[in-house]
Image (cartoon, helix red, strand yellow):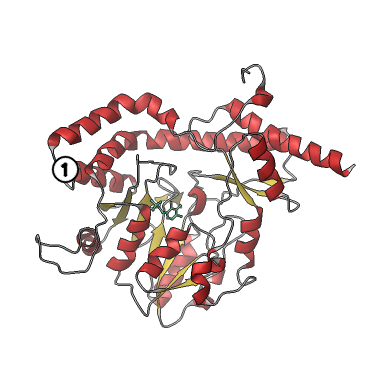
Amino acid sequence: MNPATNPAAMTVPLCDLLAQLRDLEPQLLEAVTRVLRSGQVINGPEVAQFEQAAARYGGAPYGVGCSSGSDALLLALAALGIGPGDEVLLPPFTFFASVGAVCRLGARPVFADIESATYNLDPHQVESKITSRTRAIMAVHLFGQCADMEPLWSIAERHNLAIVEDAAQAIGAEYQGKRAGTLGGIACFSFYPSKNLGAYGDAGLAVTSDPDWAERMRSLRNHGMEPKYYHRFIGWNARLDALHAAMLSVKLPHLERWTEMRQAAAARYDALIDEYHVGGFLQRPTVRPQRRHVFNQYVVRVGRGQRDALVRYFRAQKIGCEIYYPIPLHMQECLDYLGYREGDFPASERAAQDVMALPMFPEIHVDQQHRVVQCVAQFLRQQARVAA
Ligand SMILES: *Cc1c(COP(=O)(O)O)cnc(C)c1O
């Protein structure tokens, strides 16, 4: 059936990675060929060029490319000297990689709850969790909106803590006119394919304005080796491949435009939620003043305890959706040893029950967005029929 003549039959993907490929494939293949023919697939000029350009985009002087956003977090915490006996404060409502980096270094994660409206760390929850062992605060900029940094800056200063930004979902986001990447000591980006700047595989970047931390991360991502076969630190193989760097360099100049397209799509969802009269059921994302939200995800809060039913309905209608994240980190089995219990972080637990991400990618068409929100209205009509 032709979806143009029958919008009700239209399926909508959560994320369409092939849309960007249509325009950029020749340039991407050219970049791949260039790397293959250079014979240099590890380190080298492609990596250095991308690091510089991407760090500049993030507003930071130094960039260290690495194998993933997860490893960027690991390198950042390791460069700060965080290890056994240290505590790192972070929210429990984020992707596992945020906490995984802390645990992989033998440090102890300490959770502080989120603000319900933005899903980011609630600064009011932070100070009471600080102990003599606390070394850093990890500010996660969830879904593409920066955390409330100003109060975190004063807390960090008062207690002499480092701030690491988990900006995996927030490349290009801004807080009070400053880019994510300049809001703490070290910031970490992910180029996982579904992030705003997606690689064709795993890749990441850590940025900083501190040359010593940059040097330390550069060394740690390559087994702490400097010069060759002399090891000052115990590091890892966490390098960025030249192939990824070359392809990311093709994509980076388009990121601003893609971000604006995401913002336009978010504004259309905001309007469609009114147009289909589902605003009492779906709570739109809250964008705080002085923030540039880059909408890696457009996440709504679903009312009346109906989130799971709506997700099932979307799946049946072949409309993409996802739950970021269904289980807060303090309830994850592997973190049992921290001793947290259900009820410890009510805002995070509520979010985990209520949130749902709608299809979001720069090229999403207005007809697709109509279909998504129409699907919510259909769901509500069906519920009303069942109740009657
Ligand atoms: C994607 C993501 C990461 C990890 O990035 P990878 O590149 O997948 O390793 C870390 N934190 C958050 C919040 C993320 O969304």
> Relative to 80, does residue 357 appear above or below in the rendering?
above
Quarter of the image for residue 284 reads top right
Number of residue marks: 1
Q: Which element is circle 1 on? A: helix
The amino acid marked with disc number 1 is Pro
Disc 1 under 8 Å from ligand 1? The reply is no
Q: Residues within 10 Å of mark 1 (few under 14, many from 20)?
A: some
Q: Is residue 96 left or right of residue 314?
A: left
The location of residue 11, given as percent across then percent down, is 60, 29
> Relative to 302, does residue 274 appear above or below in the rendering?
above
Q: Residue at x 62, y 26 (%)?
A: 10
Q: Residue at x 18, y 32 (%)?
A: 34
> Relative to 129, does residue 388 appear above or below in the rendering?
above
Q: Residue at x 33, y 38 (%)?
A: 252
Q: Is residue 252 left or right of residue 212?
A: right
The residue that label 1 is drawn on is 45
Residue 358 visible in the current orientation? yes
Q: Judge by depth and name the residue closer to the eye, 113 or 322.
A: 322
The location of residue 92, given as percent across then percent down, is 53, 64
Q: Quadrant of the C terminus?
A: top right
Q: Residue at x 43, y 61 (%)?
A: 98
Q: Judge by depth and name the residue closer to the eye, 193 or 315.
A: 315
Q: Judge by depth and name the residue closer to the eye, 100 or 124.
A: 100
Q: Quadrant of the N terminus?
A: top right
